Image (cartoon, rainbow, N blue to C red):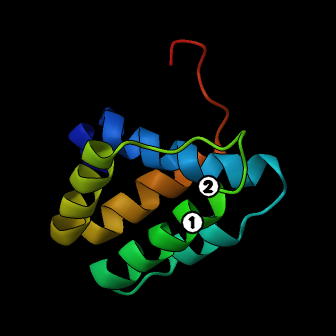
Amino acid sequence: MGESLLSNKSIKAVAGLLRSFVREGNFSYVDKIKVAKDPSQFSEILFSALREARENPKAFIPNEIQLEETLNLAKDSLEEVKRTVAIYALSFPSKEG
């Protein structure tokens, strides 16, 4: 895993979106992200997650800059981005943010 992805705030923000569903026991978006075959499919899954998150006032929603950066990273390193987002989504957030 690239060191820059591990500390990337945009990757962590997108993971925070997925973590909103994991907290509710819904692992489907994490599972779908992990098996996305290309950046287009990755972005479609994020779109679906964002759409559903809008219906939940407790859900974390990343800003557009964080989403844009994550989608651009996925174009260059899809497997690493998928893995990093999924790992962070399944983890407990640190108290530091």
**How many labels were placed on the picture?**
2
Residue ID at (31%, 44%):
66
> On the image, numbered disc 1 is attached to which residue?
51
The residue type indicated by label 2 comes to Arg
Residue ID at (61%, 29%):
93
**Picture coordinates of residue 79, whole percent (x, y):** 33, 69
- What's the distance in space between the residues labelled 1 and 2, CA to CA? 5 Å
Q: Relative to the observer, which residue lies in front, 55 or 87?
A: 55
> On the image, numbered disc 2 is attached to which residue?
54
Q: Is residue 45 left or right of residue 21?
A: left
**Picture coordinates of residue 30, whole percent (x, y):** 60, 65
The residue type indicated by label 1 comes to Arg
Q: Is residue 89 left or right of residue 4?
A: right
As drawn, 53 above or below 8: below
**Picture coordinates of residue 77, whole percent (x, y):** 22, 65
Q: Quadrant of residue 72?
A: bottom left
Residue ID at (39%, 75%):
42
Residue ID at (78%, 62%):
26
- Could you say whether the residue bearing mark 1 is in a helix, strand or loop? helix
